[in-house]
Image (tube, coloured by chain):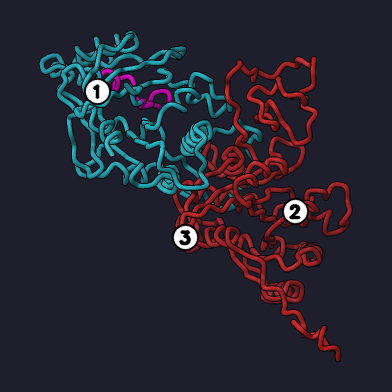
Amino acid sequence: MTKTCQRKHCYAPDNSCLMGEDDYRLCKYWAQGENQVEDGKTQDGGSILLPWSGGAFGVADLSYLASQTHPRVVALIGPLNSGKTTLLATMFLLLLRGKMPPGFGLARSLTLGGWETVAHWMKWKSGQGPQFPEHTTSREQRVPGLLHVGMRDDSGGLTDLAVSDAPGEWFRRWAVDETAADAAGARWLAANADAFVLVVDSEALSGEDRGPAQVTYELLAERIASHVNYRPVRIVWTKSDITITTQMVSRMNDRFSAVFGSCETSHITVNKLGDLPHEQDAFLNLLGWMLTASTEAKPNVPAPVSADYFLAFR
Amino acid sequence: MSEPTQVLILGGFSAGKTHFGAQLLSRLHHRRGELRLRVAAPNLSLFETALAKLSQGMTSEHTSGGLYETLVIPTRTTAGDEVDLVWPEYGGEQVDDIAKRRLLPSAWANRVLKSEHWILVIRLMSAKMEYDFLNRPLDILSMSSSRQPSQTINWSSQSSLIDLMQLLLFVKGQSTVRRIARPKLLVLLSCWDELDLAEGNKPHDILLTHLPLFGEFLDVNWFPESLFTYGLSSLSKKLSSEVPDEDYKNKGPESFGYVVLPDGSQSPDLTLPIASVLGR
């Protein structure tokens, strides 16, 4: 469908009119005279359109949430095939089973279609077994975007969380060239995320190409660190059932702690997850961290070294 | 005189609304339950076949699609309050369609706005959990086998139900930022006999077992005093659509059907859940 509203960030008739008109065609920003076919979505007079489509959020969609709460954005960062989407899909499958991060319960999600899309690869479909989610690209049906859950805590307060589901290429490009044209999404996340999750692929770091993989992670870690600006970072080792040499683990840990200082770490795997409640808890705890991780205490302002007592007054 | 309270009865295609409606109507006609008929309903053509079939102990065919009319049954509580039971669209296909089309017809929207009491009819047997790698694991190594990409993605029942509720709340102007006291919500788990449960099972526990995320979503959003879960068996037993049931012919369909109360006990008064939502 061609977008014909002239107003920036207005996606009528996909969503409701940004200017609040019940009928978007009456809005002054609606392009006149373009009666394009709206693939069956013709609006009959008084129907009410919803402000969310169910698919993964774009950046502009966050404004709907931002009008109600302060949505937290979490950047899920990792190279190609590191397991970012599988991680999201697994979280959703656990939620579907009523398994919640400690102290929270699901109050809403405006991207259920987006969640279903990532999770559908892990379901059994007429004889075909589950498989790892399709590679995320920006060209296909799977539009990279933000997946939303609104979680209510025990006190009744609501936390809206939007986690990025973006292709690994973005981050690889961004790690190499910060200003790369195809890394715009990564730059947006670096600027706007409230917390970062670095997804570390145990398989890549144990395989033949562990050398190059390590370089990729070093570049990525440095790049994140240069933007993190006291925002929380968590290292998540995926496919943790795969054995990595202890030298490699300690080399990576040394690199991460040199770059980020002390930061929290998770080890997750989907292998035999159905039988392992504590492995499931690792996913739920990670989700809990995404909901609550707050900016680290900034370092104390050093006392000014000056003979002037006015400047020393704090 | 104030307008009658509107109770909205919602449910997807094949949720069991026809048999519930027909059996409810025969209860109302017999004037023994918590709700009584106020005047005869203006138009009962939607129930005509079901009533005739049930009197012989047979099930009726599914209500054909395209029945977009609104059905209203005017009733009165034992306390004398006027209550209209409203089926906004009988076929139930529009309900399923709303999530896909992301449009709510205006006739619907008006009903939603006017009503402070919603009844959601869910048939658990048709809203089962799907199989995925958590409940039917596959050796991890064989998981990378190729599958045709871009299959159509079917939403799980739980996602569809949650989105339906979010949508209705949005139209109602009720945000989920805070917990909800109004509209009150009654979840009616239809075809309870299909589930083959021992007596004493609490409907809300069964909802949480079968639809854990949806149940969680309701618990998290509604105040407990505004959320009700009842079981419903409109027919008490499985009937055939071809072979008449002798019991039904002898005792009459009004002798069959029961509701399961929140504490797990049963009552033959099908109007009881509706009355309890209105009550508090």
Residue B137 position in % (x across, y down): 49, 49
Please name the residue that numbered disc 2 is placed on: A189
Segment colored magenta: B6-22
Q: Secondary structure at mark 2?
A: helix
Q: Quadrant of residue B154?
A: top right
Which residue is depicted at the point 43% across and 21% down? Answer: B92
Residue drawn at (31%, 31%) of the image: B190
Q: CA distance from mark 2 to mark 3?
A: 27 Å
Q: Residue at x 64, y 54 (%)?
A: A72
- Does B60 sit above or below residue A94? above
Quarter of the rendering occupied by the N terminus of chain A = top right
Q: Nearer the viewer, mark 2 or mark 1?
A: 1
Chain coloured red in the rendered structure: A
Q: Residue at x 32, y 33 (%)?
A: B188
Write down the chain letter for disc 1: B
Q: Which three-letter amino acid code belongs to the residue tagged 2?
A: Leu
Q: Position of residue B207 (x, y in %)?
A: 35, 42
Say which element carries label 3.
loop
Letter of the chain that mark 3 sits on in the rendering: A
- Determine which residue is flagged by label 1: B76
Looking at numbered disc 1 in the image, what kind of residue is underneath it? Answer: Arg
Mark 2 and mark 1 residues within 8 Å of each other at the beta carbon:
no
Structural distance between the alpha carbons of marks 2 and 1:
58 Å
Q: In front: A66, or B134?
A: A66
Disc on the earlier residue, 2 or 3? 3
